[in-house]
Every structure is written in C-alpha cells, then in structure tokens.
Amino acid sequence: SANSTDHQTSLINSTQQAIKLNPTHNETSSITSALTIITNLITEVKADLATPPPYLSPGPYHVEYPSEYIFILDEPEKCREQNPFLVLMVPVAPYNMEAREAVRSTWGSERQVLGKEVRLFFLLGLPSGKETEQLQEKVLQESKEHQDLLQSDFIDSYKNLTIKTMVMMEWLSSRCPNASYAMKIDSDMFLNVNTLVNMLLHAPTQNCQTGLVAQWGAVLRDPNSKWYLPNEVFPEQVYPPYALGLGYVFTLDLPRKLVEASRHLKAIYIEDVYLGRCMRHLGIRPTNPPNGNLFQVFPVAYDRCTYSRLIATTTYSITHQVNAWRDLHKPGPTC
C-alpha cells in the first residue's frame, strides 16, 4: 500500500543516515546501529507482506470478480488432448450428486454425435454450511472416479453464479484452445445432443452466442424480487439482449473476449444479464436460434416426436429428464 511504501522509504533513509560515519561515534557503533535498522526494516516488510488488505464486501448486488480464483479440481489436458467439437459445461452445486449422475447416465454420456466429439464437465464452487469436510471428501472421490469435475475456490451459492460463469469462461479460454463450441447448461435440463450438433454444423464459427434470447427485458425495481437491481447499480431501464442462463451455446473464440470485457464492467449477481452486458461491450448481439422451438424455458410434456426436434427444455424432475432421454434413444421412428 502507499502508506507501507512511505514507511519503508523512511526506514531506508534512516538506514542510509546511520551508515554515514558519525564523528561523535566510532565506526562499530554506527554499523551496529545500521544493522539494527536494517533488521527492523526486514521485520516490518515481512509483516507488511503477511498482512492481507482489509476485506471490502462487494455489497448485495455485485460479486467479487475479477479475482484470482484457482481450480482445486481440474482436468487440464482433457480438452486440449481430445479437441472436441462441442464441450458441455454444467454448473452444479457440490452436494447435488444425484443431478450429476442423472446427466452422466443420459445426455452427458454421448461422446460421438454425427461424427463429432463431445465432452462433458461439471463446474462446482466450494461447499458451505454443515458437514463441508465430509461433502468435499465425497466430491474428491467422485472426481477420481469420473474425472469430469472442475472445482474452483469460490463459495458455491446463487449469488455467486456470475463468478461461476466467468470462471467457466476462464477455464474454456485456457484449457480448450482448439474446441469449436461450448454449451453452458443447467443440470436439470433435458438436452438433445443430436439436434444441437446438427444445428452447430451449420452455425457461425466466431462471435456467436445463441439460446433463448431475452430482448427488452425490464429491469426489476421491486426490492422483494429475486432479481431486484436498484437504480444506482443498474441505471438503465431495460437489460441489453442476453441469452437465458438455463442453456446457451457459444463459439469458443468468445470466452477469452468475454473475460477481457469483464475487466471493464463491474460484475452484478445476475449472471446471464452480466454476460449480456459483456457481449454488448464487445459489440456482439446474441442471436436467436434458427427455429424458435429449439429451446424451451418451461417444461414440455414428453412426446417422442416433439423431443426429437428440440435442443433443450427444462424438466419437471430428474425422473422426467431420465425417462425422456431413454425413450428418445430407443430404436424406431421418432415421428
């Protein structure tokens, strides 16, 4: 800090003064005095370095990003070595092993689709609350077994979803340099990977994000709303266009650009809106998919023909998610 630097400078000046031989003292005492001051300087510098800056809360509407988050569980070479066409990134709470198993046993199990490589990763923060050590131990065992968990050192919570998304972008930027597309998708979604890959085979290869794109969404000013933003935090009356966070697809040139854009925009807790702001900063609009029915925000009752034509929909339950995928993958005509 500035104060500690000033203090160190004054100590150094004192040291230099002490080293000059004083006519009223002998040389030995001057050197002893200098050594004492140097020792004090080293001690104080060490103490300065060991004292972290005081914690400043970002407040209720912002999150601590950018920051130096690290991965305590990582699969650093998987994406680089396998060069997948599509990377599925699933943010999920550490405790939600049931959801991860459901995804692994359904759409997350698909590795080759229409001749293209697909890879799956789950993104976790740190557990909080009771029994965190036992839960973390289970997560470590799960990681050893499946080798598909990425865990960063922020607290996993709803308010930290923006951190989770931006850490995901950092990971994709550094770990998947040669992949073509990624999809961020919630664990409770049904995903038709076949329809998704088919769409991507005809999609732009740069500066593209698609999904359910919200246009002209009014900023919520009701303090009781889950997505409340006061005027001083978000002075605009409408959000910029943004893809809903439940599931969106993007080209893999975007993560690096979005991380760079985030350096210029204070991060708010509504992650998909924040990503929309970063996209606007880059001058890139999220695009609607080629067919308006491909992404569904409300659960769609299962019908084999309907599900064969969509990409993603929310589901009523894990049972709904699993049964729909299994039925769709039975042999025979879909429509």
Image (cartoon, rainbow, N blue to C red):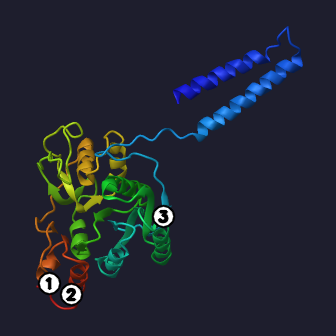
Place residue 114 in its image quadrant.
bottom left
Place residue 102 in its image quadrant.
bottom left
Image: 224 above or below 1: below
Task: Give the mark nearer the N terminus: 2 vs 1.
Answer: 1
From the image, which quarter does the C terminus lie in?
bottom left
Crowd around label 2: few <14 · some 14–19 · many ≥20 (10 Å) = some
Q: CA distance from mark 2 to mark 1?
A: 7 Å
Q: Which residue is mark 2?
A: 327
Q: CA distance from mark 3 to mark 1?
A: 37 Å
SS assignment at label 3: loop
Instruction: Give the left or right position of residue 82, taking residue 4 as reference.
Output: left
Q: Are marks 2 and 1 in contact (CB under 8 Å)?
A: yes
Q: Which residue is mark 1?
A: 304
Question: Residue shown at 23%/47% (left/top)?
Answer: 284
Kindly identify the amino acid type of the residue bearing the numbered disc 1: Arg
| Residue most extreme to the front | 130
Nearer to me, 213 or 44: 44
Q: Which residue is mark 3?
A: 74
